[in-house]
Image (cartoon, rainbow, N blue to C red):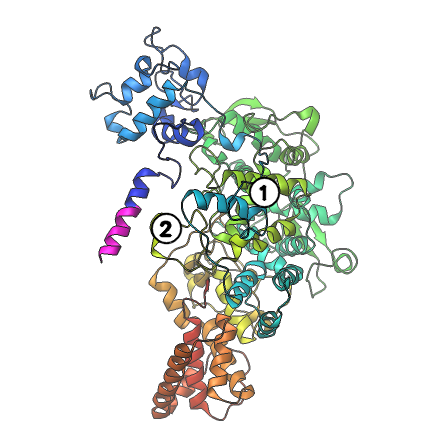
Amino acid sequence: MRFLIHLLFISLLFLLLGSCSQNKQIVSVTDSVDFNLHIRPILSDRCFKCHGPDANQRKSNLRLDTREGALAALKDNPDAHAIVPGRSADSEVFLRISSTDTSQQMPPVKSNLSLTEGEIDLIKRWIDQGAIYKPHWAFIPPRQTSLPEIPDSDWPINEVDYFVLAKLERAGLNPNAEADRARLLKRVSLDITGLPPSIEIQNRFLEDQAPNAYEKMVDELLMQPQYGERMAVYWMDVARYADSHGYQDDGLRTMWPWRDWVIHAFNKNYPYDQFVTWQVAGDLLPNPTKEQVLATGFNRNHKITQEGGVIDEEYRIEYVTDRTNTFAKAFLALTFECAHCHDHKYDPISQKDYYRTFAFFNQVPEKGLVGDISLASLADPPKIKITSEEIEEILTFINKKDTTTVEVMVMRDSSLRRPTYLLTRGAYDAHGEQVSIGIPSEILPYDSMVYGTNRLGLAKWLFDERNPLTARVFVNRMWQEFFGRGFVKTSGDFGMQGELPSHPELLDWLAVDFREHDWDIKRLIKQIVMSATYRQSSAVDAEKLEIDPENILLARASRRRLIAEGIRDLALASSGLMVKEIGGPSMKVYQPKGIWESSTSGRGVLARYVQDHDDDLYRRGLYSFIKRTVPPPGMLIFDGSNRDQCEVNRMRTNTPLQALVLLNDPVILESARVFAERLMNNSKTDEDRIKLAFQSIVCRMPGKEELSMLLTYFDSEKIRFAQAPQKADLFIQAGEYPYSKVEDVVSLAALMQVVQTIYNLDEAITKT
């Protein structure tokens, strides 16, 4: 108990001293105070709302986010200045934040904001040291520094490890030893393919004593087609992919051929610049292919209304707004949406800048309302038709079995340029000044003579080597995918309110390296998983937990629960139920009755839930049908996205409902039943069966005590079911998969109970 109280105290101390974890750092009196590291986070939290970029909300005409504004004479007192470099005693900022007079104190008492004595001292020292301003760290182009010098040169495997170890040594921590081979294989297999390693792969890897055995396994996993599916799950969240339009009627849409393209692109290892350029502007490339045009479906994944009575222009503006916000969040990690109605309060994104970016996406010849719910299966223009002949000859990656023509929504610009206006307060019909295309110049000035005047120019701007954000943002997201936390924890916000990077030099080194090696995604992933940092054990001791409870310094591997799709995939793959068919239409899996019917308008082909059968029931979670107004409940409970908008990092919650899903979900029960049947028919002894089940699900052999407990549980369940055979008969009636004849129903039910228990272990659904 005393240890827990001590741990709680340490955690609170971290919270108080480190708003947004590391944004505010303790600086000794001899250190130089840095604007980006120490001062800007304080000003952004407490001052920028009234003295920042938003001109409409600015008080006293005082701007503290720029050096020019801070050094200018005050409006009400021309002889005074907010900041006088080198003289805190003459600086109104310091005088106001240190004042005890509530009528003079800043921030105002009524704001409920305040500065600690330590923060006031930091600002005083910064002013006395010259009040040097710097551009926001994320707007400074990344550059590679030399690898840090470290005393222990034996631990690093690649460049990643030098930066990590240098930071650990400064904190007085040592990295963990490498994880045992079984756990490491499970981790890397789940991270690269989203699936647990098969028994064959486990045994082969554990027997391979070659020095490069792990690297060979990494290469093998990266070449599996399931790699593309695993990466596509992440990209579906970014692209807000769904199988319905959204809004009340929530009619059917057909965008799965675009999803097939994403899987194909990842498996073929399209360079990131090509992968993104085709999605942003594939239709504007010289003589675009049908594949390049199909890729632009990325920008048509937003919600679309099919409800009569709506104002057409209002919803058309909603669609362009969604594309603008998605572009900024997906590729720049900036909260452009905050500038939709007014200047951004914290970042240098004016409302005019917002609509200049908006102009790139405002040229699509679309309507706010197209058709009605009776035309739910048709794509809204612009669209392309994909024939069976094209699939056979060109678009071979599309998985379509029937002979019907598929229509997919894509991008196309009008022949006549639509004018774009700043919308006052963001209202669709409140036109302000007309604006031309552009991007906030603080990121990288947009020169239309260099880049062009359409979305293709925007893509060129995005991958200009001077762009400070593109490479950083993607590298950070990939790090997040493998470690659970990006270098920048706020992976959707690299702006002033976002967190500072935990390892800025490593982030920049990887970003430059990624760009200079032709934006090679598989190479980046291999760099990450080959590192000693990634290979560490996840064991944690009291010292590391006390010093670094969030594992920001990476002194161990992170323990993370599988994503919603991953839990389904684990059950299906380990039981042998999974149908490993790549691509194709989404399927409607087991779901409680009445959910769709009670939650939507009751019109159209999606008014009622019609479950699929046979092989469609046993495909990966990636292919689960997502109706926006009623997403699959099991996935939502495990924090799956409803795909309403671009999402770059899913929340991770823990609720009792998750335990109930694992105990009662038909997929888990059916997987346990089918697995138990196969074990009964193919293994000789109860011990062999339980060992094989444990190894298939947990991906390691059970320990002696674990095996003993499971065998004891199996025996007790046999006794229970033998006393009530009708319960055994009822228990094994799980799912639609054909039943395998097993004479000993009591033993089958007991073994099914054991398998289900293994599925419910924390270690089973956790990457350790």
Residue 643 or 621: which is nearer the viewer?
Answer: 621
User: Magenta includes 6?
Assistant: yes
Q: Quadrant of the N terminus?
A: bottom left
Mark 2 belongs to which amino acid?
A: Pro
The magenta stretch is 1-11
Q: Residues within 10 Å of mark 2 (few under 14, many from 20)?
A: some
Residue at point 51% right, 33% down? Answer: 138
- Which label was assigned to residue 549? 2
Q: Secondary structure at mark 1?
A: helix
- Examine the rendered structure and indicate whether residue 120 appears above or below residue 154: above
User: Magenta includes 324?
Assistant: no
Residue 431 or 68: which is nearer the viewer?
Answer: 68
Secondary structure mostly seen in the magenta stretch: helix
> Label 1: which residue?
510
142 left or right of 403 in image: left
Q: Secondary structure at mark 2?
A: loop
Cα–Cα gap, marks 2 and 1: 25 Å
